[in-house]
Amino acid sequence: MRRRPGLSARLKLTLSYAGFLAVAGTLLLAVVWVFLLRYVPDNPQGLLGISPNRYLLVRTFAPAAAVAMGFLLVFGLVGGWILAGRMLAPLTRITAAARLAGNGSLSHRIRMRGRQDEFRELADAFDTMLGRLESHVAEQRRFAANASHELRTPLAISQTLLDVARKDPARDRGDLIERLRTVNTRAIDLTDALLLLSRSDRGNFTRESVDLSLVAEEAAETLLPFAERRGITLDVTGGATLTSGSAELLLRMVTNLVQNAVVHNLPAGGTVTVRTEAQGDTSVLRVENTGHPIPPELVPTLTEPFRRGTERVRTGEHAGVGLGLAIVHSIVRAHDGTLDLAPRPAGGLLATVRLPATP
């Protein structure tokens, strides 16, 4: 944005300091006149018959007052310029850091020392903002790189299958079509997941009252056949738990959590428990599953896009595209809630979602 040139903040403060000193000096002279000089008689005998009189006092006092006023003005300008420079030095550092950030350097920090005041509070807030922005940009870059890699994989497989079919016309077309269909389905699922993740990040959805217990039952009913084929027992408990948000996104959130709990479970005989409850002004959803032990240091990475742990690999139906928990985290964040993941001592994971409750 183009602006007309104007006075700097330092010069404005300097003029303000000098102006205040000049006004203070003028008021002081006015006080001297009102409370002293005007009571001196203006006659040859002066006050109590003793010279000097008002005329002589004014003639003597006026030049000295003018010199004092000039000194106050110069002192105000010089001292104000120095004081303004010292006061605005932190702001200069913050401006320099903002320019560096605007040019793409997000690793720079102000780290202003000294006791707490408004400028240091601003500098600390700016450093915090830069840290979050740097983390967000790095996350987006990793996401873009991973998404490009994940989207490139099915396209490369399709290209390879087509090249093989072109070089070998006698190859079974039915097998080729089925493999191409599988690869294409995965590419579509990945694209849909990316679009859903982008939509939940924007948070542009219509809010309505949603009962998490009903959403949990619907998700469990949808995934029950899938759980039974894997030998997993699926249990849903809890009373009415109301919150405000998008019913579609909240259903996807619960579905992803339950699906993740079924997929990353024991080979057979595992369990998945879904519980909903209202705790004051908070609606709580818990999804707990059995499974292999998860290292605690792995848990914070589970919500990052395309991240999979040692035993979290893509196999079989409903295996996902590596965005399940990332979508859950994004939906929870868009609904002003929190997502807590904790490994169970006996193996498996406990996912706790807390959302603002509605009456």
Image (cartoon, grey):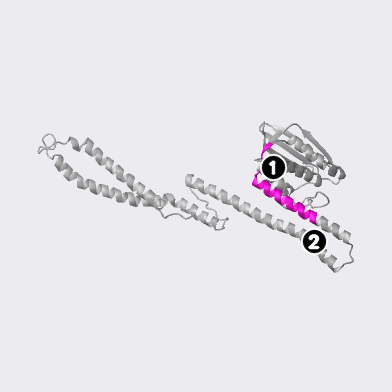
Quarter containing the C terminus: top right
Q: Which residues are magenta?
A: 184-208
Q: Is residue 156 left or right of residue 230?
A: left
Amino acid type at circle 1 is Leu
Residue 268 in sight from this viewpoint: no
The answer to whether 337 appears left or right of 128 in the picture is: right
User: Residue at position x 53%, y 57% from top?
Assistant: 100
Where 215 falls versus 13 (above or below)? above
Q: Measure how far apart labels 2 and 1 are at the Cα level.
A: 37 Å
Image mark count: 2
Q: Which mark is residue 158?
A: 2
Disc 1 target residue: 339
Residue 194 counted in the magenta span: yes
Q: Is residue 48 above or below residue 315?
A: above
Q: Regarding mark 1 in the picture, which secondary structure is present there?
A: strand
Q: Earlier in the sequence, mark 2 or mark 1?
A: 2
Instruction: Give residue 248's quadrant in the image.
Output: top right
Task: Give the residue drawn at x 41%, y 51%.
Answer: 9
Q: Are marks 2 and 1 in contact (CB under 8 Å)?
A: no
From the image, give the main secondary structure of the stretch colored magenta: helix
Residue 37 shows in the view: yes
Mark 2 Cα shell of 10 Å, populated few (<14), some (14-19), many (≥20): some
Residue displayed at 31% across by 50% down: 75
Image coordinates of residue 216 in percent, x first then y, are 77, 38
Q: Could you tell me residue 211's position as x and y percent?
A: 72, 35
Q: Foreground: 215 or 279?
A: 215
Position of residue 27 measured from the top left corner of the image (x, y, whole percent): 28, 40
Q: Position of residue 235 (x, y in %)?
A: 81, 37
Q: Which amino acid is tagged 2?
A: Ser
Tell me if residue 198 is in the magenta stretch: yes
